[in-house]
Image (cartoon, rainbow, N blue to C red):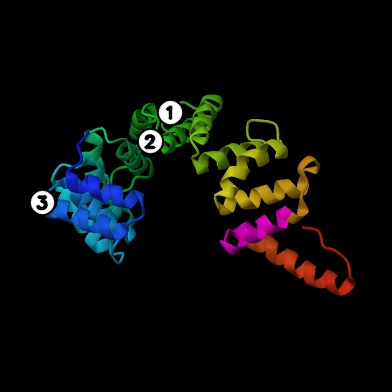
Amino acid sequence: MREFSREVKKGKECLSVRDSKNAYKWFKKGADKGDVLGMLNFGYCYYSGHGCSRDLAIALKWFQKAAEGGCEEAMFALGSCLYNGQGCEIDLEGAVKWFQKAADEEYVPALGALGQCYAKGQGVDKDPQKAVELYGKAAEKGEASALYALGDCIVRGDGAEKNVEEGRKLIRQAADKGYVPAFIAMGRALFFGDGVETDLEAASKWFYPAAKQGNAEAQYYLAFCLTNCEKIRDTESAIALLKMSSDQGFPPAVERYADFEKKLEFYKKEGEKPET
């Protein structure tokens, strides 16, 4: 692990007390001195708008300088920008190049990102087995997204021998680390009875933390659980969750909430209360 220069230390101290203006100044000093971590963090200032106006093109420029200077985190940041078209046109082959460089240095998030590229055939020929190999390396380091991705591959038998029980164990580990897609996967299995007995009460416990973090899909399914499971029925909360999911544009919630509003308007005229 690289040691922080005085400038980077000062910049991080400023960020810790939300003094983004002075953080920007310290990181710039580090970047101007050729410190790769200064360059990286100066890039993050432009990426997030800390102490300056957000400018993804400038952020990309500094990530590239730091990456070319050998900074693994910057290689990953640069690859992520190229993958998502942030500050540039989408360049999947370029993203794979920088993810690979970072992965070669055992930078864990890059292992998972590179695995995703192989899983989807983005910027590289599709290779499910290679994806599983890379997810496995990152999962061994405790990377939550990789634990989830590896578990999902094993559940589906994609690039690995199908084993629903073992795959779900990995997804559970990712959920235990707070990874939102893993909460939803565990909840959906119980909601739909996929390999287990349908249990809306148990499903709701998995959907809840994801819904609390604002995930529209989890809000929708939790609303359904609260409407249809007698043990936990809470119609008022269900309606609120359905609206939050609908407001975010989650298609099933949009359709169902629109239907509810029509019923509400009708029953207002009739003096009755509609069902969700």
Residue at the image point whose x is 59% and y is 49% from the top: 211
Classify 151 as above or below 93. Answer: above
Q: Which residues are magenta?
A: 237-253
Residue at the image point whose x is 16% and y is 46% from the top: 36
**Mark 1 touching mark 3, by CB under 8 A?**
no
Tell me the amino acid under the disc marked 1. Answer: Ala
Q: Is residue 240 left or right of residue 96?
A: right
Tell me the amino acid under the disc marked 2. Answer: Pro
- Residue furthest left as drawn: 33
Eye-nearest disc, 3 or 2 = 3
Residue at the image point whose x is 83% and y is 72% from the top: 268
| Residue at image mark 3 | 33
Distance from Cα at disc 3 to Cα at disc 2: 43 Å
Q: Earlier in the sequence, mark 1 or mark 2?
A: 2
**Percent position of residue 68, x then y:** 14, 47
- Is residue 242 on the magenta stretch? yes
**Percent position of residue 199, x then y:** 71, 36
